């Protein structure tokens, strides 16, 4: 006999079973309609600063180098092989001093040929001159015709022209001999040597740079975005890296009209009013150019939030964080200059900028006026 047939269900059993089913269905319905539990997130505490316009000293500092005001890049006027070098870097030279020499063999041969041509032309000239003088005298005595006299005069004039040409060729060859010796054009100091003994150089290739005696200057390079902030005659304050506590004053004397093709910067020369005696050529200097003061908003550099090309800052409005786009204009110490996006009185988050979300409620730890 089946076990289930032996169980006799009474009315009480049916009632209890119905109550249990109803309770289960009610509990499931209650769970379905119950609102989701709200996570109780703590409100973060942030450090802030209240921004305000302040007067900023718009002084830009550029690295530079001590250079001579006048530098001569000397080159041979003839090509050839260098056979002698008479100076070294830093040597003092005087005007007319021989610095380098080229091998003069080929030029000497040309000079010898020019001398021979000149002597030949001179002999022809003397002969033509004597013949013309003789026939002129005979013509005066009616011993020869005018046609004969004119023939010898023509020969004399041709010989005279040939002599002038030969003399010019000889002088040019002699100059070429002189060009085999590179001479200093002014008193000064050898700043660089670009060729050595045995090297073959072409005419016009700079091989020695001589810094002329006299005033010195500082050479700096200014980026193109700062070019509008400088002008000729602008005052400058100069310090020297190797000379502690020594400063000098000067002014901008020259601004290059075209940027360097590689660095895209403009070469600027700063004249020094009184160069310290200890300042040597090639020393490193710093040039501070002040273009006045301006009112500008500055915030701590840590307040800038940037994930792409656009810099942003978190601004607290109604106790909620809002991300605002800003435009920067460089650094001033540990602060960033802001030219667009913020207004005086805005509360900017300076700490924990990477942990905030748009519209997130925050509590202010404290604020200070910047």
Image (cartoon, rainbow, N blue to C red):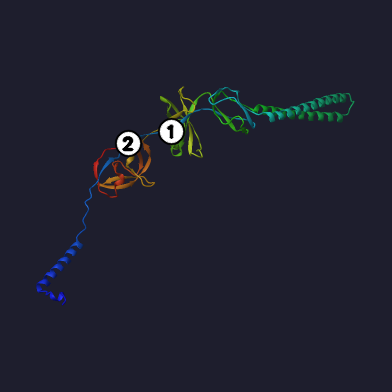
Q: Which mark is residue 160?
A: none
Question: Relative to residue 309, is residue 365 drawn left or right?
Answer: left
Above or below, comparing residue 57 to residue 140 in the picture? below
The x and y percentages for residue 276 are 45, 23
Q: Which residue is mark 1?
A: 62
Above or below, comparing residue 56 to residue 313 in the picture? above
Pointer 2: residues within 10 angstroms few (<14), some, or many (20+)?
A: some
Above or below, comparing residue 19 to residue 113 in the picture? below
Q: Quadrant of residue 291?
A: top left
Question: Relative to residue 319, is residue 58 drawn left or right?
Answer: right
Residue at 86% over, 29% down: 148
Question: Relative to residue 311, is residue 76 drawn left or right?
Answer: right
Residue found at the very far right of the displayed protein: 143
In this rendered view, identify the residue nearer to me: 89 or 15: 15
**Structural distance between the alpha carbons of marks 2 and 1:** 24 Å
Q: Is residue 168 visible?
A: no
Q: Which mark is residue 54?
A: 2
> Element type at marker 2?
strand
């Amino acid at each position: 006999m089946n076990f289930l047939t032996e169980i006799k269900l009474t009315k009480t059993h049916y009632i209890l079973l119905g109550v249990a089913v109803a309770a289960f269905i009610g509990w499931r319905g209650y769970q379905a309609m119950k609102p989701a539990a709200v996570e109780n997130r703590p409100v973060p505490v942030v450090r802030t600063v209240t921004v305000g316009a302040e007067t900023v000293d718009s002084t830009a500092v550029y690295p530079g180098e001590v250079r001579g005001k006048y530098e001569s890049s000397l080159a041979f006027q003839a090509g050839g092989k260098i056979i002698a070098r008479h100076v070294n870097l830093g040597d003092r030279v005087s005007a007319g001093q021989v610095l380098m020499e080229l091998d003069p063999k080929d030029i000497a041969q040309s000079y010898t040929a020019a001398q021979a041509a000149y002597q030949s032309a001179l002999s022809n000239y003397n002969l033509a001159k004597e013949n013309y003088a003789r026939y002129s005298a005979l013509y005066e005595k009616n011993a020869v015709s005018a046609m004969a006299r004119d023939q010898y005069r023509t020969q004399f004039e041709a010989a005279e022209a040939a002599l002038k040409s030969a003399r010019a060729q000889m002088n040019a060859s002699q100059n070429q001999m002189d060009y085999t010796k590179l001479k200093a054009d002014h008193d000064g100091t050898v700043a660089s040597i670009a060729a050595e003994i045995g090297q073959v150089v072409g005419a016009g290739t700079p091989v020695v740079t001589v810094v002329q005696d006299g005033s010195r200057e500082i050479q700096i390079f200014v980026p193109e975005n700062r070019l509008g902030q400088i002008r000729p005659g602008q005052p400058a304050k100069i310090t020297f890296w190797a000379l502690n506590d020594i400063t000098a004053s000067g002014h901008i004397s020259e601004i290059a009209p075209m940027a360097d093709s590689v660095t895209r910067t403009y070469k600027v020369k700063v004249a020094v009013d009184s160069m310290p005696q200890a300042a040597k050529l090639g020393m490193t200097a710093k040039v501070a150019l002040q273009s006045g003061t301006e009112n500008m908003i500055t915030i701590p550099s840590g307040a800038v939030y940037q994930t792409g090309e656009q810099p942003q800052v978190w601004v607290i409005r109604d106790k909620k964080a809002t991300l605002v786009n800003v435009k920067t204009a460089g650094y001033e110490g540990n602060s960033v200059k802001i030219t667009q996006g913020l207004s005086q009185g805005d509360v900017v988050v300076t700490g924990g900028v990477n942990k905030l979300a748009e519209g997130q409620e925050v509590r202010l730890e404290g604020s200070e006026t910047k």
